[in-house]
């Protein structure tokens, strides 16, 4: 089981806007349908954000989450992973609102504050579907995503200690990995750690293969290979190539329309499941086995779906 690969699928996120892909799931029923299809295709973990059904903008409203998360939980055995990142415009209280109600097995947690920008994407778009999109995308040039040590400590306490939630620790830079190691030394984070190394976001690590190898070596040194599970996220066009390299180095993988709206060069992904099936084919061609949701739960020390309140 230790050699099996966990596939995470990040279904919609808060980065891409409706204009960027007509296939991006926005309404609750679309998010549910695509998440269920991705799970059936082989995703053991479903990483979920919510969108305002009226215009697709990111929302932290628990009422919107409730329109699709219970349906997904009833239809699949996949691990449901609720974001605590939300979007760059949300407060920590906004981002924690639904996780504190749902008490999920897993949540994401950004391992530090950072410049998180997609503003160059606005230059390539001439016509926008909704009025909010252009200022949202251009505005990321002057926004910092905040997750201070105190913010992370609060997340660990109110979700981890009080509700038994474990985390997908998102590391966008080498400094985030040092933050993770520090908080482990402080006793706030206990192994097994699920480390999601993220490459290709402007403001974070570039998508260079050398960075992937260096982060893996650094994690071994700072955390100890026996204490963590390593997963790779490649943003945009770097998705499949970096995931393949990561898998060769022994990593788990993350796909989904949150991370890339493409399936291949010049080819839009029509569903999240298309990306899941593609990476699954690659992994199986490399003679790697795919972890089931129950195997992922065992590897990551999760409490079980029956302990959640979806």
Image: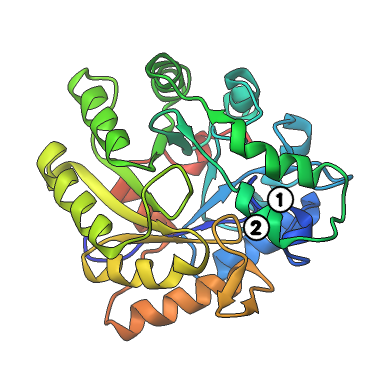
Q: Quadrant of residue 90?
A: top right
Q: The residue tagged with tag 2: helix, strand or loop?
A: helix
Give the crowd class for mark 1: few <14, some 14-19, many >=20 residues within 10 Å.
some
139 horizontally vs 256: left or right: right
State the residue position of label 1: 71
Q: The residue tagged with tag 1: helix, strand or loop?
A: helix
Count of picture labels:
2
Q: Residue furthest bottom?
A: 285
Above or below, comparing residue 259 to residue 282 in the picture: above
* Residue 66 appears in the rendering: no
Do the numbered discs 1 and 2 sit on residues whose CB atoms are within 8 Å? yes
Question: Spatial distance from mark 1 to mark 2, Cα to Cα?
Answer: 6 Å
Q: Quadrant of residue 243?
A: bottom left
- Residue 223 locus on image (x, y percent): 16, 38
State the residue position of label 2: 75
Q: Residue at x 54, y 29 (%)?
A: 144
- Residue 299 locus on image (x, y percent): 29, 50
* Residue 152 appears in the rendering: yes
Give the crowd class for mark 2: few <14, some 14-19, many >=20 residues within 10 Å.
some
């Amino acid at each position: 089981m230790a050699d099996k690969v966990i596939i995470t699928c990040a279904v919609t996120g808060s980065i891409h806007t409706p204009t960027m892909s007509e296939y991006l799931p926005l309404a609750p029923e679309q998010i549910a349908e695509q998440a269920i299809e991705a799970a059936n295709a082989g995703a053991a973990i479903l990483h979920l954000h919510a969108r305002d059904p009226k215009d697709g903008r990111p929302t932290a409203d628990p009422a919107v989450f409730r329109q699709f998360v219970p349906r997904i939980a009833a239809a699949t055995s996949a691990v449901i992973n609720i974001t605590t990142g939300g979007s760059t415009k949300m407060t920590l209280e906004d981002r924690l609102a639904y996780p504190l109600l749902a008490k999920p097995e897993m949540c994401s947690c950004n391992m530090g504050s950072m410049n998180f920008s997609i503003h160059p994407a606005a230059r390539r778009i001439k016509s926008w579907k909704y009025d909010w999109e252009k200022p949202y995308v251009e505005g990321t040039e002057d926004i910092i995503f905040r997750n201070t040590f105190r913010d992370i400590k609060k997340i660990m306490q109110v979700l981890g200690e009080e509700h038994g939630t474990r985390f997908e620790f998102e590391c966008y830079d080498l400094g985030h990995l040092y933050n993770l190691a520090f908080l482990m030394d402080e006793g706030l984070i206990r192994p097994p750690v699920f480390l999601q190394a993220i490459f290709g976001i402007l403001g974070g690590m570039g998508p260079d293969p050398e960075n992937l190898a260096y982060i893996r070596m650094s994690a071994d040194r700072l955390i100890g290979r026996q204490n963590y599970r390593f997963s790779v996220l490649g943003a945009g066009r770097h998705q499949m190539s970096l995931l393949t390299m990561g898998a060769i180095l022994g990593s788990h993988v993350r796909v989904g329309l949150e991370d890339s709206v493409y399936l291949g060069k010049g080819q839009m992904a029509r569903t999240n499941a298309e990306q899941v099936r593609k990476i699954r084919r690659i992994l199986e061609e490399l003679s790697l086995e795919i972890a089931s949701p129950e195997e992922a739960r065992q590897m990551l020390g999760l409490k079980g779906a029956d302990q959640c309140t979806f």
